[in-house]
Amino acid sequence: MTSYAVTTQVSVSTAADLVRVTPPPGTSLKLLECHVTNDQFDNQEQLPFAIYRASTNGGGGSAVTAVPLDPSDPAYLGSVAALLTSIATKEAQLDRQGVPAAGGYHYMPMKKSRPVIADNRRFVCRLEAAPSTTMELTITMVVQVNG
């Protein structure tokens, strides 16, 4: 079991899929944690963030490199994209929280309740409503490849 960190920065002004992580072929993927940080700290509005299991990729976005937590581990063979231009098809909502944007969002399930997806699904971190002004966000997802 190899763990990877996916970290990216985005500028967002609409509801959007912030990060999508797809497992490598023939494996499953466990979500260990996800957090979103508002890099500007000047937006005090309440915003809804969510984690989904998705059945499609959504469209567009820019590629992000997943970094192994142990530098001796192999490169990540799944796909990762940030700030998708069209949303992925939601299969199940795993978490949703309305949080003050300045404080950010943090999802870290207990060990026994960490979600797992097969290689034909994806994890998506989504901002579900448009902020009143453009926000600079840093998103980090930590995942573990099984199999």
Image (cartoon, rainbow, N blue to C red):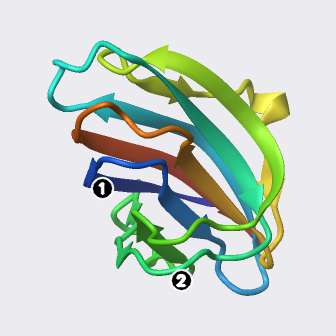
Q: Locate the N terminus and report the quarter of the image it occupies.
A: bottom right
The residue lying at 40 percent from left, 65 percent from top is 82
* Distance from Cα at disc 1 to Cα at disc 2: 18 Å
Please say if 107 is above or below 19: above
Is residue 118 visible to the viewer in this orientation of the structure? yes
Q: Position of residue 144 (x, y in %)?
A: 62, 56
Q: Is residue 120 left or right of residue 142?
A: right
The secondary element bearing badge 2 is classed as: loop
Q: Amino acid at mark 2?
A: Leu
Q: Position of residue 127 (x, y in %)?
A: 50, 42
Q: Is residue 131 left or right of residue 78?
A: left
Q: Which residue is mark 1?
A: 8
Residue 55 found in image quarter = bottom right
Mark 1 or mark 2, which has the lower sequence index? 1
Q: Is residue 27 left or right of residue 142?
A: right
The answer to which of 47 and 69 lies nearer the viewer is 47
The answer to which of 33 and 95 lies nearer the viewer is 95
The residue lying at 66 percent from left, 47 percent from top is 31
Residue 57 found in image quarter = bottom right
Is residue 1 visible to the viewer in this orientation of the structure? no
Say how many tags the image has: 2
Q: Locate the C terminus and report the quarter of the image it occupies.
A: bottom right
The secondary element bearing badge 1 is classed as: strand
Q: Which mark is residue 77?
A: 2
Q: Which mark is residue 83?
A: none
Dot 2 crowding, Cα within 10 Å, few <14, some 14–19, many 20+: few
Q: Amino acid at mark 1?
A: Thr
The residue lying at 33 percent from left, 63 percent from top is 71
Which residue extends farthest bottom? 25
Which residue extends farthest front? 132
Q: Is residue 32 left or right of residue 6?
A: right
